[in-house]
Each structure stands twice: as C-alpha cells, then as structure tokens.
C-alpha cells in the first residue's frame, strides 16, 4: 500500500508540474506585448498617415486648379474672353452678344482644407456683358503642410496654390488670388 501511495504522490507532482509549465509566464506575455507595441509604433511613424492625407489634399487642390484653368481656357477660346469673376454667361467677344454658356468655379467644390476657391479676373471690372473682355484669370486654393517642397520652397499651412492664366501654371504663393500680388491675374 505504501508503494502505491508513493506512486500516486509522484504522479500527482508530475501532473502539477506539467500543468504549471504548459503555458507562458506573465513576464513572457508582457515582453511579447511590448515588442508588438514597439513594432506598431514604428510602422505608424513610417507611414505617417497625417502627412499622406495632407499630400493628397494638396494634390487634389492642384488638380482642381488645373481643371478650372483648363475649362476657363476652353471658355476663353470659345468666347475670346475669360469668364467674369462673379459667374454668369459672360460676353462673347467674337459675336458681340451674351455668351451661350455659363462658367464659374463650382460653388460646392472645396480645396483640401475645405475652403472655397478664390477666382479673380483682370481687369477686375470686366462685366458679364459688354465689350470689355476678361483678359486673364487667377484661381487659388489653400495649401496644407505635407513636408514637401515645391520649386525649392517648403509647403506650409497658410500658403496658397495659385493658377494664373498668364503663365498657365500652378505656383505656390503666400497670398490667395486677388487683384494685386503674387497671385494676381
């Protein structure tokens, strides 16, 4: 009987040892969790989602400006004048009558920051009807700091993307489209 009891005690100790050593210790689990957290932070820092969102906002604004400039250029080709700043049908310089189609920067379209685009003409007083043509335009939208540079200049919040019909190009300026300054028509 003593022999049987010794065997049971040894069996009981072996099963207790197996149960205790079959899982991970708390320290091992904490080490794994810390390593995974460090890797997750490293991936987020490498991806930098805020910078990527800002870069896409800038790309969208520049694309919108190029589209607006292109469509205003088509309008200018059709009617020998750019569309007036306040919208409307404008004046067809070739026929001397009101233009047959309206053009304006769409009211619901916003730049990357959610602000409306600014649109100015030169001369500023070019009417929607009459013989005084709109000779040039400037359209601007706000830039967002995305850590990039444009023609050697760092893009920062408060800058503006500016399309000018005089150059047909988009530039980075510190002022929005207006009647004078870096983004004037």
Image: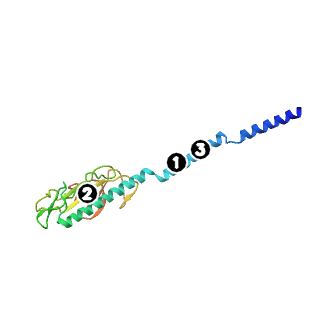
Q: Can I make out residue 182 in this image? A: no
Disc 1 and disc 3: Cα gap in Å? 12 Å
User: Between disc 1 and disc 3, whose residue precedes?
Assistant: 3
Q: Nearer the viewer, mark 1 or mark 3?
A: 3
Q: Is residue 66 left or right of residue 50?
A: left
- Comparing 173 with 79, the one in front is 79
Q: Which mark is residue 124?
A: none
Which secondary structure lies at badge 2?
A: strand
Of the two numbered discs 3 and 2 on the same chain, state the one appearing first in sequence: 3
At 25% from the left edge and 52% from the top edge, which residue is drawn? 107
**Residue to which mark 3 is pinned:** 33
The residue indicated by pointer 1 is 41
Does the image show residue 2? yes
128 to 78, vertically: above or below: above
Q: Could you say where residue 164 lies in the image, as x and y percent from the top left?
A: 25, 61
Q: Spatial distance from mark 2 to mark 1, Cα to Cα?
A: 40 Å
Secondary element type, mark 3: helix
> What count of labels does the image hold?
3
> Considering only order in the chain, which callout, 1 or 2, is on the residue closer to the N terminus?
1
Residue drawn 76% across and 38% down?
15
Left or right of 170 on screen, residue 25 = right
Image mark for residue 139: 2
Residue at position x 64%, y 39% in the image: 26
């Amino acid at each position: 009987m003593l022999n049987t009891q010794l065997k049971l005690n040894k069996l009981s100790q072996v099963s207790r040892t197996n149960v205790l050593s079959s899982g991970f210790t708390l320290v091992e689990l904490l080490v794994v969790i810390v390593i995974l957290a460090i890797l997750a932070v490293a991936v987020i820092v490498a991806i930098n989602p805020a910078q990527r969102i800002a870069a896409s906002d800038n790309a969208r604004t520049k694309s919108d400006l190029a589209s607006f400039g292109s469509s205003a250029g088509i309008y200018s080709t059709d009617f020998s004048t750019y569309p007036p700043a306040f919208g409307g049908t404008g004046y067809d310089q070739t026929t001397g009558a009101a233009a047959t189609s309206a053009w304006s920067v769409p009211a619901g379209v916003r730049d990357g920051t959610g602000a409306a685009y600014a649109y100015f003409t030169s001369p500023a007083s070019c009417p929607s009807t009459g013989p005084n043509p709109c000779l040039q335009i400037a359209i601007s939208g706000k830039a967002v700091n995305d850590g990039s540079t444009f023609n050697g200049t760092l893009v920062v919040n408060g800058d503006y993307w500016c399309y000018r019909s005089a150059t047909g190009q988009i530039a980075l300026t510190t002022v929005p489209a207006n009647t004078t300054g870096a983004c004037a028509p």
